[in-house]
């Protein structure tokens, strides 16, 4: 929901103007990190990022407004990796994700995101 976050997410209505109302993460980055760490059998959802993308340079969206499935977002900054990534993906994941941990974004318009809209 615009200005509030994703319904049922742990950060929904977290605080006013929160820069991480939603988070994006690149499927390609996840696959690369898993390959480098020798990890298999895990899905990108273990990262607790909300929206998994493919073929998008998320870092280029910092400071930009953009649209996904008719919903407007504002890219606020990198979603820096934390120690949780070492548990979720595997030892060394936090370091491997440096500079490519995803994107924090504010939600500018309300709407419904569809899973795998292809």
Image (cartoon, rainbow, N blue to C red):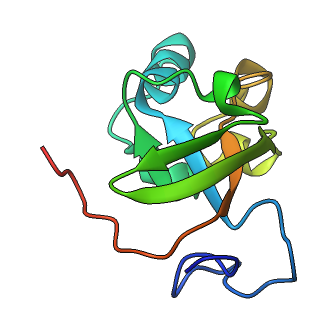
Rendered view: 67 above or below 99: below
| Along the viewing direction, whichever of 111 and 53 lies nearer the viewer | 111
Q: Quadrant of residue 43?
A: top left
Of 63 and 43, which appears nearest the observer?
A: 63
**In screen coordinates, is 65 left or right of 31?**
right
Residue at 49% x, 16% y: name it.
Answer: 32
User: Does residue 113 lie above or below 85 as drawn?
Assistant: below
Q: Residue at the spot x=56%, y=46% of the render?
A: 24
Placement of 33 over or under 118, stated as above or below: above
Q: Position of residue 11 (x, y in %)?
A: 71, 78
The residue shown at (49%, 76%) is 110
In the displayed structure image, the side of residue 77 where residue 33 appears, left or right: left
Whole-percent x, y for residue 42 in the image: 38, 42
Question: On the rendered image, what quadrant is the C terminus found in?
Answer: top left
The quadrant in which the N terminus is found is bottom right
Q: Is 104 left, or right, of 54 in this rendering?
A: right
Q: Give the residue drawn at x 82%, y 60%.
A: 19
Position above or below: 52 against 63 = below
Q: Is residue 9 visible?
A: yes
In this view, the residue in front, 91 or 77, is 77
State the residue lying farthest toward the top. 36
* Viewer can see residue 79: no
Q: Nearer the viewer, residue 42 or 106?
A: 106
The count of marks equals: 0
Residue 74 placement (x, y as % from top left): 68, 50
């Amino acid at each position: 929901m615009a200005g509030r976050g994703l319904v049922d997410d742990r950060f929904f209505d977290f605080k006013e103007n929160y820069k991480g109302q939603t988070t994006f993460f690149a499927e390609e980055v996840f696959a690369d990190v898993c390959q480098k760490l020798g990890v298999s059998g895990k899905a990108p959802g273990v990262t607790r990022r909300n929206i998994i993308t493919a073929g998008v340079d998320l870092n280029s969206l910092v400071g930009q407004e953009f649209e996904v499935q008719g919903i407007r977002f504002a890219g606020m900054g990198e979603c820096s990796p934390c120690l949780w990534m070492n548990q979720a993906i595997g030892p060394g994941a936090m370091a491997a994700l440096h500079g490519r941990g995803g994107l924090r974004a504010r939600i500018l318009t309300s709407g419904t995101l569809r899973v795998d809209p292809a």
